């Protein structure tokens, strides 16, 4: 069989429609300190600046969509040719200045666009630790366009304070009467508060982009939340109540989070989310029951830290896919965030403490 024709077709660059030409004069891209070399750029009909660029950091079709969406956010800019096989694009824009702005924006997302003679720089590739640290720092400080994400961080810290304060009050007036309560439950109460707040932060961050989700991103979202919520809460409930209650509670929480996030892309996301919650809820409970005599409490701290890192990585993925949040995308205020965190945490606390016990668990006296 002759595969030559198929091979040529696969390597044929994908072309995207050109944006309407704007009546502006194309600027020469300046070169010098702090400015990328633009020796490969050229003027087209005296109206547009066109450059052939080599891409560094693109790994899949999803990367291509991110690059296309990023370029299209700039008025008058478009990608005339997109050759994913050879990592090459031909980009048209209104001026040399705009070309530099586009290149810098893509660099922030982990994609280097190289003009002839340029070499890729280390530390800017997609998925690098350097980029992850910059993202965390920007979210925490609210700099570099992360003011709205920083607002969610403030909501999270406020909610964690109120949840922990409520736990202290409950202990003082209710749980202190239970012999050995503090030694048995302190770790689970603390980790539950942290986990609930982390899940809500990631949930409302995902909720902001719900209208933009592709099918693949929606399924990933449902699966991530279903498994993260189910495994964490299932492990805590399994440690305090045993396999049966732990599985039911873990499944309920995981499936709820998986459903409400997966539905953004329809039935496929819902199925992925529910299946993720179903599996992770039972697995979390089973793991705690199996480790009850084998340093379970230190493991729960490690588990919470790992799950928190995964949720943070998920938020970073959303940023790369869709950019920064804007104020109108936040669908909850600080008081609502606190109330939601309190309601979930207190409901879980009641189950952990007063739920039916099975076998040897942290709460069996």
Image: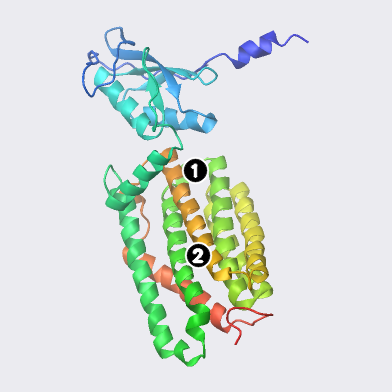
* Observer-nearest of 284 and 26: 284
Residue 67 position within the rendered picture, expressed as x and y whole percent measured from the top left:
43, 29
Asked whether, in this view, residue 118 is left or right of residue 178, the answer is: left
Q: Quadrant of the N terminus?
A: top right
Mark number for residue 14?
A: none
Mark number for residue 301?
A: 2
- Within 10 angstroms of label 2, few (less than 14), some, or many (20 or more) residues? some
Of callouts 1 and 2, which one flags the residue occurring earlier in the amino acid sequence?
1
Report the residue marked by disc 1: 213
Asked whether, in this view, residue 118 is left or right of residue 65, the answer is: left
Residue 97, above or below 268: above
Residue 274 position within the rendered picture, expressed as x and y whole percent measured from the top left:
63, 57
Q: Residue at x 66, y 62 (%)?
A: 283
Residue 308 position within the rendered picture, expressed as x and y whole percent measured from the top left:
47, 57
Report which quarter residue 35 is drawn in. top left
Colour style of the rendered protein structure: rainbow
Q: Secondary structure at mark 1?
A: loop
* Observer-nearest of 180 and 260: 180
What is the residue that sits farthest to the front in this orientation?
294
Q: Secondary structure at mark 2?
A: helix
Residue 195 position within the rendered picture, expressed as x and y whole percent measured from the top left:
47, 64
């Amino acid at each position: 069989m002759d595969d030559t024709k198929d091979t040529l077709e696969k390597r044929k660059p994908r072309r995207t429609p050109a944006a309407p030409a704007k009546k502006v004069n194309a600027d020469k891209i300046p070169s010098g300190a702090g400015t990328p070399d633009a020796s490969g750029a050229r003027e087209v009909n005296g109206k547009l600046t066109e450059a052939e660029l080599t891409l560094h950091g693109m790994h899949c079709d999803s990367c291509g969509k991110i690059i296309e969406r990023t370029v299209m956010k700039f008025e008058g800019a478009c990608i005339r040719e997109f050759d994913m096989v050879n990592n090459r694009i031909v980009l048209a824009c209104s001026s040399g200045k705009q070309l530099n702005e586009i290149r810098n924006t893509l660099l922030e997302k982990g994609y280097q666009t190289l003009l002839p003679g340029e070499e890729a720089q280390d530390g800017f590739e997609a998925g690098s630790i350097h980029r992850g640290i910059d993202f965390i720092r920007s979210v925490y400080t609210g700099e570099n366009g992360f003011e709205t994400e920083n607002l969610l961080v403030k909501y999270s810290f406020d909610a964690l304070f109120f949840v922990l304060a409520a736990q202290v009050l409950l202990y003082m007036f209710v749980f202190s009467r239970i012999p050995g309560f503090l030694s048995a439950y302190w770790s689970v109460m603390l980790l539950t508060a942290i986990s609930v707040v982390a899940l809500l932060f990631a949930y409302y961050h995902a909720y902001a982009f719900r209208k933009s989700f592709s099918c693949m991103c929606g399924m990933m979202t449902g699966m991530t939340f279903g498994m993260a919520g189910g495994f964490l809460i299932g492990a805590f409930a399994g440690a305090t109540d045993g396999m049966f209650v732990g599985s039911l509670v873990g499944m309920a929480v995981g499936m709820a989070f998986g459903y409400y996030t997966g539905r953004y892309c329809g039935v496929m996301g819902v199925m992925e989310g529910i299946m993720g919650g179903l599996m992770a809820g039972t697995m979390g409970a089973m793991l705690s029951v199996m480790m009850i005599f084998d340093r379970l409490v230190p493991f729960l701290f490690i588990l919470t830290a790992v799950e928190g890192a995964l949720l943070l990585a998920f938020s970073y993925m959303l940023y790369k896919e869709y950019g920064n949040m804007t104020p109108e995308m936040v669908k909850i205020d600080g008081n609502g965030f606190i109330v939601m965190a309190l309601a979930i945490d207190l409901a879980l606390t009641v189950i952990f403490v007063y739920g039916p016990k099975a076998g040897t668990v942290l709460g069996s006296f």
